[in-house]
Image: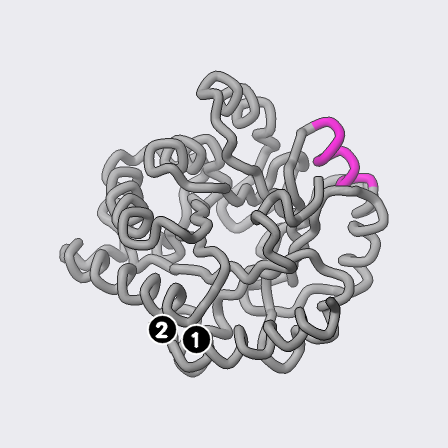
């Protein structure tokens, strides 16, 4: 699948992240959902107004993360916010990521709010993480998507950050399995932690292994995107867009504008 099919003729799309504050049901929730809601919409507005090609919403503040989130408070809160983002910005690609590895739940939210894609932290591996063992969930997601007759795309992490694989398969082997056996629509390569740069070597290996789009999912900034440009098919940008590059901070509109202006120049050169 060509990345331009995934994102409607947008060359190397930039996806900004709305990192939600702790939601109802989370140990760190402060009891004011309106504050969480308003902060999320302000971040979404800064990203949209700054010119990103897509927005992904994730429950970043819900530490410590549950695996396969079932708390109705969390899921309804995410749904409310995602629905409003879709309603206000209905001409942008919207994605959902429910931490940790709650791909089925993310797909359900995406279906209800008419989002375009989901991010799945572990589609096809067994990983050790701070939250416990993360098991592959491709079968559940793909069967639910087929049942819903949905066209929602699945963006799958390979060797996702904040986790370690428990097998010895090469990254190329895992990438092929994720695409050929688990039906990922695109793959994501990241650094080892939030905000850390991805390995260009890993990116190149994954690109050579599969024909699906491969995105960089962490560590992208105005100062390093050019070195990834010729290898990656898209970028998920979170921490860099924040004030002082702190993930928990609000989105800095001026940084979004600067990066997107630079991306425009890169697109012009590559064309």
Indicate which disc residue 246 carries.
1
Q: Which residue is rendered at x = 50% and y = 40% of the image?
A: 101
Percent x, y of residue 120:
54, 41
**Magenta stretch?**
173-181
Indicate which disc residue 20 carries.
none
Q: How many marks?
A: 2
Left or right placement of residue 43 versus residue 25 in this view: right
- How is the rendered protein coloured? one colour
Q: Are marks 1 and 2 in contact (CB under 8 Å)?
A: yes
Q: Which residue is rendered at x = 39% and y = 60% of the image?
A: 19
Indicate the quadrant containing the C terminus: top left, top right, bottom left or bottom right.
bottom right
Percent x, y of residue 127:
63, 42
Q: Please rate how many residues cluster around mark 2, counting C-alpha atoms within 10 Å: few if below 14, some from 14 to 19, many from 20.
A: some
Residue in the foreground of this view, choosing between 69 and 105 = 105
Relative height, residue 184 to residue 201 (above, below):
above
Asked whether residue 182 is in view, the answer is yes
Residue that badge 2 annotates: 249
Percent x, y of residue 27:
27, 52
Left or right placement of residue 252 versus residue 6 in this view: left
């Amino acid at each position: 699948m060509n990345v331009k099919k995934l994102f409607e003729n947008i060359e190397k799309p930039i996806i900004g992240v709305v990192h939600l504050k702790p939601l109802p049901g989370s140990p760190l929730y402060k009891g004011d959902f309106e504050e969480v809601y308003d902060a999320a919409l302000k971040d979404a507005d800064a990203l949209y107004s700054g010119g990103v090609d897509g927005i992904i919403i994730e429950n970043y503040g819900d530490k410590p993360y549950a695996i396969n989130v079932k708390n109705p408070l969390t899921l309804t809160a995410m749904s409310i916010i995602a629905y409003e983002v879709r309603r206000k910005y209905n001409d942008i690609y919207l994605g959902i990521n429910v931490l940790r590895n709650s791909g089925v739940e993310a797909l359900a939210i995406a279906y209800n709010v008419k989002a375009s894609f989901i991010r799945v932290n572990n589609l096809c591996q067994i990983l050790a993480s701070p939250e416990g063992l993360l098991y592959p969930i491709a079968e559940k997601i793909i069967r639910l998507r087929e049942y819903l007759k949905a066209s929602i795309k699945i963006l799958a992490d390979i060797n996702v950050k904040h986790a370690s694989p428990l097998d010895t398969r090469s990254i190329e082997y895992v990438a092929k399995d994720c695409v050929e056996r688990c039906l990922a629509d695109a793959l994501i390569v990241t650094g080892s932690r939030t905000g850390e740069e991805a390995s260009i070597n890993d990116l190149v290996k994954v690109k050579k292994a599969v024909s699906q789009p491969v995105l960089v999912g962490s560590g992208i900034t105005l100062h390093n995107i050019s070195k990834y440009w010729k290898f990656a098919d898209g970028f998920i940008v979170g921490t860099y867009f924040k004030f002082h590059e702190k993930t928990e901070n609000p989105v800095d509109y001026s940084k979004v504008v600067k990066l997107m202006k630079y991306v425009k120049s890169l697109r012009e050169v590559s064309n």
